[in-house]
Image (spheres, rainbow, N blue to C red):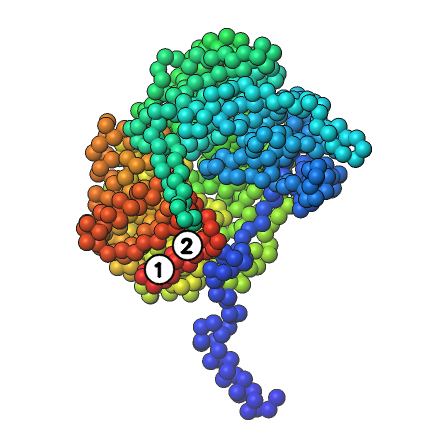
Amino acid sequence: MTLRIAKLFLFLFFVAIQIPGWTQIEKKVITLEDIFKGRKFASKGFAGVQSMNDGDHFCQLKKDSLNVYDYVTGKYISTLVFARELIPAGDSAPIDMGSFEFSNDESKMLFATDEEAIYRRSSKANYYVFDLKTKKLFPLSENGKQRLATFSPDGTKVAFVRDNNIFIKDITLGMLTSGGKSDRQENGVEQQITFDGKANEIINGATDWVYEEEFEFSQAFAWSPDGKKIAFYRFDECDVKEYQLTYYGELYPEQYKYKYPKAGEDNSKIAIFLYDLGLKKIIPVDIGKETDIYIPRIKWTEEAGTLALYRMNRNQNKLELLLADASTGNSKVIYTEESRYYIEINDHWRFLKNKKEFLITSEKNGYRHLYLYDISGKEVLQLTKGKFEVVDVLGVDEKSGLVYFSSTETSPMDKDISAATLDGKKRIKLSNRAGVNTAAFNKTYTYYIGRWSDINTPPYIAVYKANGTQVRLLQDNAKLRETMAEYGFSKAEFFKFKTGDGLELNGLMVKPPDFDPAKKYPVLFTIYGGPGSQTVNNSWGAVSSWNQLWAQHGIIVVSVDNRGTGGRGEEFKKCTYLQLGKYETLDQIEAAKYLGGLGYVDKNRIGMWGWSFGGYLTLSCLTKGADYFNFGIAVAPVTNWKYYDNIYTERFMRTPEENNNGYEDNSPVNHAAKLKGKLLLICGMADDNVHPQNSFDMVTALVGADKQFESQFYPNSNHGIYTGKNTSFHLYKRMTDYILEKL
């Protein structure tokens, strides 16, 4: 190397180290196509897994087969069924393997194919029964699509719902094969056990719309442990008012009507019945004389002759547990809980196999904790204590005397996996990483598949022993972590601040990758904020790749958990009672004030976007908080709580008749004239959940107040706005363009 060349090289080196980006690899730019079409930043999981009865093995659905593997070694054991074995007689292609259920003895399977969605949790399908021993496949019914098909405990029958009635099919004889052709044997005369089902009038064995949405279940029947009885719901929705949606695309649009009880309006009349298969007799269950009530859950106890029911008053602040005699329908109350706010329904209750005790969770001491009761309803002991929440009950191993659960013991942003002894003497923390941990136990509670992530780390999935010891890695998303580095993902960070009233709130922040504290940046809140929710979580997904795209464009991304959200006890969550939206909005305004006071934030460019309750909160902040928020995107927002369903709304607000001021004061429609900033309003025009009526009324109010705004409406799309070709991508491109142009 000559002296001249050496000097030139030295000169270029010193120039390079003083020019930003020259000393590091150029980072790739995130695009919408990368996110939504290429799925470049989607994490990998370990899906389609189900524990086998022996606890040593699990089955997993692969492309063309359902295989069995060993939990400890991961070794392939066998194939239960190949796709080629699931070709119906007379067809050339196999049915879909994606949705399946085993009989209790794992000798038969039910497959659902040609599924059609009804609402969020409901669908109908053509079900097929597959016998794993004989390798024979036959349709459950040829009289129309079925719903909720479920094996009896002994696997000899299947109960299902069709046209709002319940049917039972005996499947013991299955299918005969002769001469290469299949002849269906007359075992399968379907036994219809209810006959009054009718659309928009009577439903047997399935839920009405509002139960499905707000009590979060759609199957409204259950086999008794001995298979001799079926308990089921009957909904009489004749007095429930209808809502109408319009579907476009034909010469004359289709008008779809369904029953939707808005706040303060009539509900379905509910009844619970028992069907005795031996006597072929329907027995009514005594649920009390009051008809304006809810029965949010039924469950058979370990005693085949005893059915348990939750009964709740219309205001949802009194919960009773009833036990009913399956032979007579007579019932008695064994447990009562009341709240000055409301009581939430969950699936945490467990009846122990000793037939003497049951487990529940309750917030009666200010935090949701586990309690053990005897079957007479007397409290035995409180199993968990402290200023944290039990989030979920993962299972009970009576043999080891342990109940497994997840909780917020580390912090409201984290979720731990723990076990407590049923004698209340010991609590054991199984997970050992800060972040959000989940666990799916096998059927013998000897192993579980655990998933861990934190706010900056994609899921790490492994098999663990029941004591929390890792056995083997299943997925660590190493490739995704490399991709994140290539694209220069910014690290998210948590922060806390105090409001003017001294209340401490939790938030998260993502700064641009080239953040300079001497500069001023716009801020975009991403928010939900509804009762019991949390967006400030120490988990992968709390910050999306879409958020990272904004950061690359020089926007600080923020989320704050306001009062009313979960993880911090009953008072923090339920202080919004009767004033839904008031304190949530005040807290977000306080967050905007706090951020506006930071030296690197442009307080004149603070915006918010949200979906559903988040859309509602966005509109509320842009109107009531117009001095602090000058930009917003509201997707599928509630704009008047009188328009939303009664179970959800009355839980937090009571009826409009009881609390009219609470409804009116917290409706963005009534504050439209306060809008100062830029607004994009979006909704699906076939939203069965948050009706487009909400957005239309907001439009009317804004126009009446002479406020300019932009809007985007999607025909035939429901609350998720994904129906139709390219709809989701179009939606996110519309929002992205609006953010980058207007904020």
Which quadrant of the rendered structure holds the C terminus?
Answer: bottom left
Write down the residue under mark 2: 731
Does residue 71 appear in this view? no
- Residue 663: image x %, image y %? 24, 35
Choose between 676 and 209: the one closer to the eye: 209
Choose between 617 and 284: the one closer to the eye: 284
Q: Residue at x 29, y 51 (%)?
A: 592
**In the rendered image of this protein, does residue 327 appear above or below residue 48?**
above
Amino acid beneath label 2:
Leu
Q: Residue 477 carries which label?
A: none
Q: State left or right for residue 182 relative to residue 366.
A: right
* Quarter assignment of residue 361: top left
Q: State left or right for residue 624 relative to residue 270.
A: left
Q: Element under label 1?
A: helix
Q: State left or right for residue 288 relative to residue 104.
A: left
**In the rendered image of this protein, does residue 21 appear above or below residue 228?**
below
Estimate how packed mark 1 is, as few (under 14), some (14 to 19) or many (20 or more) residues with alpha carbons within 10 Å. Answer: some
Estimate how packed mark 2 is, as few (under 14), some (14 to 19) or many (20 or more) residues with alpha carbons within 10 Å. Answer: some
Write down the residue under mark 1: 738
Q: Which residue is drawn at 30% across and 36% down?
A: 643
**In the rendered image of this protein, does residue 197 appear above or below residue 328?**
below
Mark 2 or 1, nearer chain start: 2
Tell me the CA gap for discs 2 and 1: 11 Å
Amino acid beneath label 1:
Tyr
Choose between 72 and 316: the one closer to the eye: 316
**In the rendered image of this protein, does residue 280 appear above or below residue 140?**
above
Q: Element under label 2?
A: helix
